Image (cartoon, helix red, strand yellow):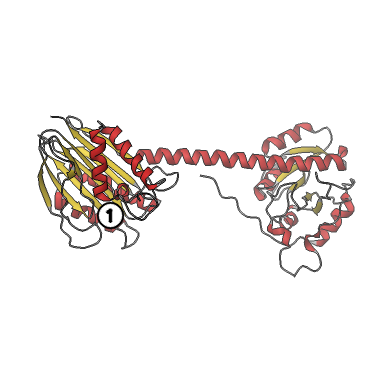
Amino acid sequence: MPVPVPRQRAIPAVEGGQARAASAVGAPADTASAPDAPAGQAPPSATRGSGDPAGSSAPLTLLVIEADAGSLSVPQLLDSAGKPIRVRTARNLTEAERLLTDDVHCILLDLALPAPGRAAEGDDELATLKHVLRLAPRHAVLALTASGDAERGAEAVRVGAQDYLFRDELDGRLLSRAIRYAVERKRSDTAERRLTESRLRAQENARLERGLLPTPLLEGSSLKFAARYRPGRSRALLGGDFYDTVRTPDGTVHAMIGDVCGHGPDEAALGVELRIAWRALTLAGLCGDELLGTLQQVLEHERDNDEIFATLCTVDIAPDGRRAGVCLAGHPSPLIARAGHVVELLAPENGGAALGLLPNARWPRRQVELGGAWSLMLYTDGLIEGRIGKGKERLGQDGMVDMVRRQLAQGLRGEELLRAAVNEVRDLNGGELTDDVAVLLLDRMA
């Protein structure tokens, strides 16, 4: 995750330091602290960050940090547009910190300047530079060293300076070009670092979210499993919808799909907690009303506020695959396609309330006959609440049943069926769906 960069304090520049800069370097004094600026208020230019483009309307500002303010004497400094580069000078790091407002673009640091607590830092010749880099992580830094001391200058660049200059070879043209180069290089380095950090963060998030998606535990079962998942959040892999499938030691296959209200990362995290709790409770032998009641306790303890709720559909399929128990907690009924029968909703009657709404709710378990060969589809409401065309009409459960019936007649099965269903719902909506969509399919061949 990118580390937030602290904003430099916007403190008005000291006029005395600017006057010394103008006389020593030959550049016009910094106008940031003009006499008409209100006392104690940062100048307008101080509100601009050091990342302002060098070619923008705001002129470049250089902060010179050196013990002898009169030792530098070069002609006027100009930026790439021919505008004067504003100069401030500081005799020590304490004064430099006061002058380091947000409109400073570059720092020219005399490496001979002693650092605070130099004795404590031992013989580190670049202690002053390291202190400045910690003080101004967003600013370009030019290191000023004695002529012929190229090794020290190169080491300064390795530590973090953008470039180094020899004191005795300094002139206005060289320094102007070095300032522009340092500012652009710092901006490029910062942009590259942020891009790299953004990519790493995206990769870490993707790995985390993929790890949170379930792996079905169906070893030993003849049922075929398929699932599709499409979060409503932009560039997310995980939403508030969740699903899972496990086979217990007695041969029963348990399937579940649910939906936490909302679409943010908090809802996604709660959905993962409920899924993991469901798997643990199912493997422990809980089922039906007892299982849902325990899940409601988990939700009540983990949610951020009392208005958060979750819908849920659970199905437990007998070891022979011909019967199933269905529990609905405010969730849409699953769809069943059986050989010799029309595609229909498996348990259209209303079940119990959604988890988290009623403290003493009950969830009746309905026993249903599946038959020999069948396809059972569990889904969240994101699949049925998409619009049809430009009007306000939504697909609904009846529209979904008709769509799946037609796709099955076309010979679509498994992953192909789910992919076609989700894509058609999106096309009917006229674009991406705003709600999370999860679909789970179990098939049994006769």
Q: Residue at x 27, y 49 (%)?
A: 258
Q: Residues within 10 Å of mark 1 (few under 14, many from 20)?
A: many
Residue 213 shows in this picture = no
Q: Is residue 341 left or right of residue 79?
A: left
Q: Position of residue 115 (x, y in %)?
A: 72, 48
Q: Quadrant of the C terminus?
A: top left
Is residue 199 left or right of 191 when viewed as pictured?
left
Which residue is label 1 attached to? Answer: 310
User: Residue at the spot x=54%, y=41% of the render?
Assistant: 197
Circle 1: element type? strand
For the residue pair 393 and 218, the one nearer the viewer reads as: 393
Task: Tell me how many marks there are.
Answer: 1
Return the x and y of residue 157 as percentages of the image width and height. Answer: 71, 36
| Relative image position of residue 30 (x, y in whole percent) | 81, 57
Q: Quadrant of residue 371?
A: top left
Could you tell me the amino acid type at mark 1? Ala
